């Protein structure tokens, strides 16, 4: 049995090398284009407002680094995961928010200025909070220096890939607003088309091997973790009385993890023969958070269509209105 699993993992690993390169190349190009598009929906004055009054940012950070690590820890106990499985899901839970949350926030008509500020702050704070959380939650599970494996270079790269294209979009929105509609449409079209390629490559990467290599307990905890993050992020922001757009943004920021950082830690820390197929866990989590996020977007879209005429937010002074030439931030009087 062990020999069969070893051979299966060996074949998976060879396939993974080629598809990983293809996925990384596609993701970098798509991320740059999409983040420029998202930058076109942002305004400097509103970004500075969130920085001066960081209530939403503080709640998001509390949810990101309070809810997600605790959720991962509890799920590991409830599903009685093995040591390596518990390590994988806990490492994922301690990671900062990912760029997928920004894309989902736009689709949910959330506050894009808050979304980018939250993801930036979450990623910067990861430099100090990730080692601390890994030390606190993984004590007793792993005797090595896991907190010393935090990929600081990867964190900086994540910031660069997010902030530079966003800055380009913001400048474009300030200097040439007549082009922003086209840029946003192009970015969303690229995202839609590339999503198909990413899903296909992801399925090739793990598809037929998921049931053979992952236990039902790990599959269950991986499916529940992003859902709980989305749910508790929304509830927590509602408790602190953020408006609906900010609640949706915090919801997305909490449930979406930076799986690239998780993957890097697993690769740096463990040899393939020790962790085996769990090298694929970050991609498995990505597939679940992508599917659940899209389902959540569909639910909110249906809700908006039923409760708000023409999909417009009639009760918030700072909202996105979908127009023929793209998405624009504009005041809407009640």
Image: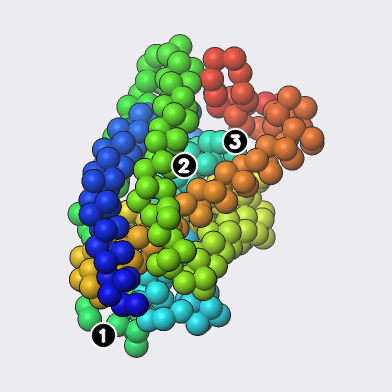
Return the x and y of residue 241 as percentages of the image width and height.
67, 54
Residue at x 35%, y 33% (from the top left corner): 30
Instruction: Please tell me whether mark 3 sits on a helix, a strand or a loop.
Output: loop
Q: Which residue is mark 2?
A: 102
User: Which callout, 2 or 1, points at the residue further toward the start of the chain?
Assistant: 2
Q: Residue at x 62, y 31 (%)?
A: 319
The answer to whether residue 193 is above or below residue 1 is: above
Foreground tag (2 vs 1) = 1
Question: Considering depth in this image, is 27 or 312 the residue closer to the camera?
Answer: 27
Cα distance between the residues tagged 2 and 1: 36 Å
Which mark sits nearer the N-terminus, 3 or 2? 2
Question: Residue drawn 26% across and 85% down?
Answer: 143
Q: Residue furthest bottom?
A: 140
- Residue 197 visible in rendering: yes
Residue shown at 48% from the left, 17% from the top: 181
**Along the horizontal axis of the image, is 178 left or right of 146?**
right
The quarter of the rendered structure image containing the C terminus is top right
- Residue 200 screen position, x and y as percent: 41, 41
Q: Position of residue 92 (x, y in %)?
A: 39, 64
The foreground one among 128 and 270 is 270
Mark 3 or mark 1, which has the lower sequence index? Answer: 3
Of the residues tagged 3 and 1, which is closer to the observer? 1
Tag shown at residue 143: 1
Relative to 69, does residue 96 appear above or below in the rendering? above
Mark 3 is surrounded, within 10 Å at the Cα level, by few (under 14), some (14 to 19) or many (20 or more) other residues, namely many
Q: Residues within 10 Å of mark 2 (few under 14, many from 20)?
A: many
Direction top: furthest residue: 178
For the residues marked 3 and 1, what is the alpha-carbon distance in whole angstroms? 44 Å
For disc 3, the marked residue is 109
């Amino acid at each position: 049995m062990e020999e069969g699993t070893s051979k299966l993992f060996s074949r998976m690993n060879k396939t993974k090398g080629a598809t990983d390169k293809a996925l990384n190349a596609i993701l970098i190009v798509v991320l740059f284009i999409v983040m420029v598009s998202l930058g076109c929906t942002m305004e400097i004055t509103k970004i500075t407002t969130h920085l001066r009054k960081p209530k939403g940012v503080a709640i998001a950070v509390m949810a990101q680094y309070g809810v997600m690590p605790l959720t991962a820890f509890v799920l590991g106990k409830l599903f009685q995961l093995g040591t390596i499985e518990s390590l994988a899901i806990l490492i994922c839970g301690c990671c900062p928010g990912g760029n997928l949350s920004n894309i989902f926030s736009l689709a949910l008509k959330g506050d894009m200025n808050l979304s980018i500020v939250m993801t930036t702050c979450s990623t910067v704070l990861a430099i100090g909070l990730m080692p601390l959380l890994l030390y606190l939650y993984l004590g007793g599970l792993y005797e090595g220096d896991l907190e010393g494996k935090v990929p600081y270079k990867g964190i900086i790269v994540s910031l660069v890939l997010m902030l530079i294209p966003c800055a380009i979009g913001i400048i474009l929105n300030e200097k040439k607003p007549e082009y922003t509609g086209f840029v946003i449409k192009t970015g969303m079209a690229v995202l839609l088309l590339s999503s198909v390629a990413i899903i296909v490559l992801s399925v090739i990467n793990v598809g037929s091997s998921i049931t053979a290599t992952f236990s039902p307990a790990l599959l269950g905890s991986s499916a529940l973790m992003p859902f709980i993050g989305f749910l508790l992020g929304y509830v927590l922001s509602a408790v602190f009385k953020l408006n609906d757009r900010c609640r949706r943004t915090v919801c997305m920021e909490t449930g979406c993890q930076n799986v690239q950082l998780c993957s890097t830690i697993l690769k740096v820390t463990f040899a393939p023969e020790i962790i085996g197929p769990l090298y694929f866990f970050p991609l498995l989590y990505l597939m679940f958070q992508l599917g659940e996020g899209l389902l959540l977007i569909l639910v909110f879209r249906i809700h908006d269509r039923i409760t708000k005429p023409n999909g417009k937010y009639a009760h918030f002074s700072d909202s996105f209105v979908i127009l023929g030439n793209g998405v624009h931030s504009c005041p809407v009087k009640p």
